[in-house]
Amino acid sequence: MAETKLMGQNFRAFVGSPAAAVSEAVNCQVTISGNMEDGSTKDSTSSWQEEQMVSKQWSVTVESVDATLANLRALITQFNSDSKVNVGFDQAGGAQNRVAQNADFARSGDAILNDLSIVANNRSTIQVSCQYQGSGELS
Amino acid sequence: MDKGQHLRLVIVSSGTTPVASFVSFSTDLTFHLSAQTDDSTTKDSTDSNGLWNEYDVVGRSGDINFGALVVVNSSSIPNTDNYFQHFISKVSDTAVDWKLVFVSGENNRTVGKTVCYGKGKLTNLSVSAQNRQKATYQGTLNLYGPVTVGSD
């Protein structure tokens, strides 16, 4: 069976309800990590720790060049809000690579916009970076 | 795509007649907001495998880092700009009003729509003066209180 190696532009973050691909995105990073605890006891007969996962978390970071007034205002409004937003990722294709393909690896969940950076340097395109910290299950 | 020179930091002086002042000869700007979250997972939390953490926002903070050229200007020259010399005295516990605005026109000094605004304290000012290079400085405005989205 032929394998398709996915290009970065076809792996996109989707935000909101209904979920929409983050516009003008240039980079996205998904991180899932677990917190481990040593489960070894006196019953353990070696000196090696026996790690077990006790909790886990996820986050999505998206960098884009969508620095329109409307988008910047919307992001700061979301940051100021206590409400969570639906964030996920999927294989994307079609028009502007924005159509979700419902790949087997697609996942989404509630998240908090917990870090927002706007970089506006002279003679450079404005860069917008958002980090969404997942809250609850990534399903 | 919007260019960096079209988004500028404006310091608004206090007083009966507030004056909006650009950071003069500015080169770079980074606006940063950060939310502190706390794990709110309890024994009531259930999901497919009982491992996913849940979070709530418990605090918000932010800062604005800006860079500019050190320019020597005479205090006798009337202007409404913020130069390096003006910032020296502003490194203090006194909050200043700031705005992040889109600009256009000559010297990118025609103020357009406001992205957001708030108060901040200038907590850091550092100069880099290397031989055969223009002297530059970086300032850090620690945001004080809420950031309000512009509505103009």
Image (cartoon, coloured by chain):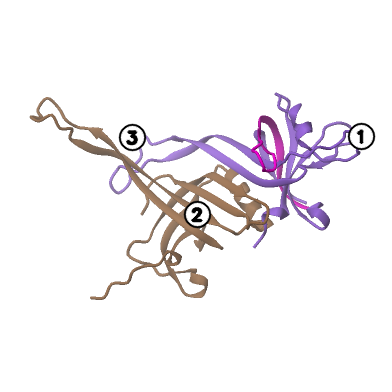
Chain colours: A brown, B purple
Q: Secondary structure at mark 3?
A: loop
**Residue tagged 2:** A62
**Residue tagged 3:** B43
For disc 1, the neighbor class at 10 Å (few under 14, some 14 to 19, many from 20) is few
Residue at the spot x=9%, y=28% of the render? A43
Residue at the spot x=32%, y=64% of the render? A104
Question: Which amino acid, mark 3?
Answer: Lys
Marks counted in the figure total 3
Is residue B112 one of those drawn in magenta?
yes
The disc numbered 2 marks a residue on which chain?
A
Check if mark 1's residue and mark 2's residue have beta carbons within 8 Å. Answer: no
The x, y position of residue B110, in whole percent, is 82, 53
**Residue tagged 1:** B76
Asked if residue B39 lies left or right of residue A122, the reply is: left
Q: Main secondary structure of the magenta part?
A: strand
Tell me the distance, in whole angstroms, between the alpha carbons under discs 3 and 1.
68 Å
The one of B118 and A3 positioned closer to us in this rendering: A3
Asked if residue A34 lies left or right of residue B19, the reply is: left
Quarter of the view holding residue B105: bottom right
Question: Which amino acid, mark 1?
Answer: Ser
Question: Which amino acid, mark 2?
Answer: Val
The disc numbered 3 marks a residue on which chain?
B
Check if mark 3's residue and mark 1's residue have beta carbons within 8 Å. Answer: no
Quarter of the view holding residue B112: bottom right
